[in-house]
Amino acid sequence: MEGSTSSVPPAADVAPLPLPGHAPLQAGAPCSGCRQPIMDQFFVRNGEAICPSCLTAQEGSFREALAYGLGAALLSIALYYGIFFAWHIKFVFVAVIAGVLIGGAVRRGARVSNRLGYRWLAVVLTYVAVAATYAHALAELSEVTGAFDAALRSLYLPLVMLWWRKNLVTLILLGFGVHEAWKFSAPPYVHVEGPFLVTPPAASST
Ligand SMILES: [Zn+2]
């Protein structure tokens, strides 16, 4: 069988059977990820056999993480302004909800990758989403020239609040939101061993 997978080590590097702590895997046994039969190489992830393409897929996709994260950010902003325009309530607690939603959304695209870039993406998106909820209050100020100016000022408003020690509750909620984004974008525990070779069907006698 020719190696069709490019991102995994060639068969020459494969560890010899039997696998430490695992029963040998027969050729054709299903991958625990995609359920496709494994005919050649496999890896053991958290004690379960997976095929090389599932191992590659678990690295996630930055584009997907960005798309899901942006979606969650827009949803959080829509939630805030929906409540604001419907009931004239400043739902500042949305900062924490945004952190949870965006952190989880980024992790969905990142799969089990432990690259730190994904977590910073969640943090930055949460900061921008929460800052966007300050824009309407800024737009009412006389010195603010328009929507773009208000949006721009909202991005550094937390620094102004920190400097003048104003709106501390808002700042604390922003801090919580960013913390939730960091926490919910954390990768799950993953331990991968391998690659290993399957036991050929003919060589059943050991
Ligand atoms: Zn698979």
Image (tube, rainbow, N blue to C red):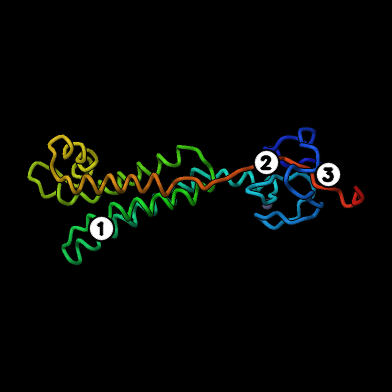
What residue lies at 50% left-to-right and 45% top-to-bottom?
187
What residue lies at 16% left-to-right and 37% top-to-bottom?
160
Relative to 70, residue 161 above or below: above
What residue lies at 29% left-to-right and 55% top-to-bottom?
77
Earlier along the polypeptide chain: callout 2 or callout 1? Answer: 1
Relative to 166, residue 29 above or below: below
What residue lies at 46% left-to-right and 45% top-to-bottom?
186
Q: Could you tell me residue 96's position as x and y percent?
A: 30, 53
Q: What residue type is labelled 1?
A: Tyr
Q: Is mark 1 on a helix, strand or loop?
A: helix
Q: Which residue is the site of mark 1?
A: 80
Q: Could you tell me residue 18's position as x and y percent?
A: 80, 43
Left or right of 112? Residue 158 is left
Q: Which residue is the site of mark 2?
A: 193
- In space, the residues marked 3 and 1 are separated at their CA atoms by 56 Å
- In space, the residues marked 3 and 2 are separated at their CA atoms by 22 Å
Crowding at dot 3, Cα within 10 Å, few <14 / some 14-19 / many 20+, comes out as few
Q: Could you tell me residue 92's position as x and y percent?
A: 22, 54
Which numbered disc, 3 or 2, marks the residue closer to the eye? 2
For this orientation, the residue located farthest to the bottom is 86
Badge 1 residue CB within 8 Å of ligand 1: no
Q: Is mark 2 on a helix, strand or loop?
A: strand
Q: Which amino acid does label 2 sit on?
A: Glu
Return the mark for residue 1.
3
Relative to 11, residue 75 above or below: below
Whether label 3 touches label 2, CB < 8 Å: no
Whether label 2 touches label 1, CB < 8 Å: no
Q: Is mark 3 on a helix, strand or loop?
A: loop
For this orientation, the residue located farthest to the left is 142
